[in-house]
Image (tube, rainbow, N blue to C red):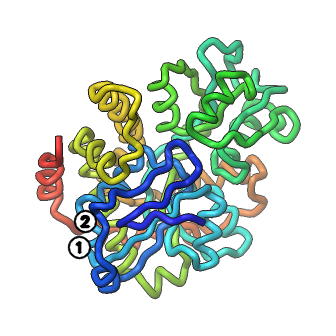
């Protein structure tokens, strides 16, 4: 598994995977003084939509100032979760379906921070496609980033809700992510593309017109991308959890306050994400489309704190998964998540963060 440290990145074989700017590297002595923390990420696409939880905490030195030496491990959700369960990573940012399945089988993994507060994964077709409803998916092929991705579980449930048999009526194939996935759709290698918000925005930036599908029950799936840890980390390293996720919360506030500043920061930290084939104005317009699309899924409900996980969101996800035979038993909801760190995570001066956000590079 390849690593991205908070100070340097190693390239992966994907058009949207990047390296950290060498100027942000720190000396080994500095690194040794901070507590090491490895965060796995359930995607290897670190585009601008990931600014709030990657580049912004790095650029502002939030993790560094909190005494953490953070290493990021971008990969797919299955590998990311296994990295946490086997001790190769301390924390994972991914969708909850795989973790819920694992918990029903006895895996000691639990959500501690809700990052994406709405379902952000959708099956899409080209606007010119004759496919108009979910029922039209029968006999069709859908491309997904990986078979183990949470979107597969969500889509299977959506298809069942529409009266289809997801085991017989629809064929899932792995098409990866980024340009190769878009190409698979536009060249007809798949009929449908299963993807997420920022990838849809990226395709739209490429001029591809898409139509996305959802369902009434899918809209109830507000237990979106979250941070998970092993049970033993909750008891042994609570302060590390608080520090790491306080920076994610501040990164979210920063990004929402100044999207263009966050975009420029992302390009500074991950220079290979900046488009090289378009002029500056176009690059900014496209980058902001990605960030603003993601922001819609990060926004807090009134009266809710950063990272807070509503029990209704967990209950709806479990009910959805059980109703569609993704899981056969109903785990105790309290085994799946905890809000015990939320007060500490939100213990920061919002006005100060907003002021700093407004001062980011233009």
Q: Is residue 173 above or below residue 99?
A: above
**Residue 65 - label:** 1
Q: Residues within 10 Å of mark 2 (few under 14, many from 20)?
A: some
Q: Quarter of the image holding residue 144?
A: top right
In this rendering, would 296 be left or right of 196?
A: left
Point out residue 52 in the picture as x, y percentages from the top left corner: 34, 52
Q: Is residue 301 visible?
A: no
33 or 246, which lies in front? 33
Point out residue 82 in the picture as x, y percentages from the top left corner: 65, 69
Q: Residue furthest right?
A: 168
- Residue at the image point whose x is 65% and y is 22% from the top: 186
Point out residue 174 in the picture as x, y percentages from the top left corner: 73, 43
Point out residue 220 in the picture as x, y percentages from the top left corner: 55, 42
310 or 274, which lies in front? 274
20 or 37, which lies in front? 20
- Residue at the image point whose x is 73% and y is 33% from the top: 142
* Secondary structure type for disc 1: helix
| Separation of marks 2 and 1 at Cα, in angstroms | 6 Å
The residue identified by callout 2 is: 61
Q: Is residue 85 visible?
A: yes
- Which image quarter is the N terminus in? bottom right
Q: Quarter of the image holding residue 192?
A: top right
- Residue at the image point whose x is 33% and y is 57% from the top: 21
In this rendering, would 140 be left or right of 200?
A: right
In this rendering, would 256 be left or right of 228?
A: left
Marks 2 & 1, CB-CB < 8 Å contact: yes
Q: Residues within 10 Å of mark 1 (few under 14, many from 20)?
A: few
Q: Quarter of the image holding residue 160?
A: top right
């Amino acid at each position: 598994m390849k690593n991205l440290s908070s100070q340097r990145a190693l390239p992966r074989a994907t058009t949207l995977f990047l390296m950290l700017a060498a100027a942000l590297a720190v000396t080994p002595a500095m690194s040794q003084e901070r507590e090491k923390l490895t965060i796995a990420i359930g995607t290897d696409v670190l585009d601008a939509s990931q600014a709030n939880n990657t580049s912004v905490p790095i650029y502002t030195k939030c993790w560094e100032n909190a005494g953490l030496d953070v290493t990021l491990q971008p990969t797919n959700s299955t590998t990311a979760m296994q990295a946490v369960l086997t001790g190769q990573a301390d924390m994972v940012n991914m969708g909850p379906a795989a973790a819920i399945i694992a918990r029903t089988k006895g895996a000691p993994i639990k959500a501690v921070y809700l990052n994406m507060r709405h379902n952000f994964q959708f099956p899409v077709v080209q606007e010119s496609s004759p496919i108009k409803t979910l029922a039209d998916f029968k006999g069709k092929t859908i491309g997904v980033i990986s078979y183990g991705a949470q979107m597969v579980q969500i889509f299977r449930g959506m298809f069942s809700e529409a009266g289809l048999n997801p085991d017989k009526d629809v064929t899932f194939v792995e098409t990866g992510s980024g340009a190769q996935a878009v190409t698979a759709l536009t060249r007809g290698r798949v009929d449908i593309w299963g993807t997420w918000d920022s990838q849809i925005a990226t395709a739209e930036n490429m001029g591809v017109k898409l139509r996305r599908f959802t369902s009434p029950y899918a809209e109830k799936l507000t237990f979106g991308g979250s941070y998970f840890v092993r049970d033993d980390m909750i008891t042994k390293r609570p302060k590390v959890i608080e520090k790491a996720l306080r920076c994610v919360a501040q990164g979210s506030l920063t990004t929402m306050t100044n999207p263009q500043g966050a975009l420029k920061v992302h390009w500074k930290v991950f220079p290979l994400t900046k488009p090289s084939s378009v002029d500056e104005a176009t690059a900014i317009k496209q980058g902001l489309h990605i960030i603003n699309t993601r922001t819609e899924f990060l926004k807090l409900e009134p009266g809710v704190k950063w990272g807070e996980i509503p029990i209704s969101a967990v209950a709806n996800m479990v009910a959805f998964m059980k109703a569609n035979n993704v899981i056969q038993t109903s785990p105790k909801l309290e085994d799946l998540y905890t809000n015990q760190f939320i007060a500490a995570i939100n213990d920061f001066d919002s006005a100060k963060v907003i002021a700093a956000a407004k001062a980011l590079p233009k």
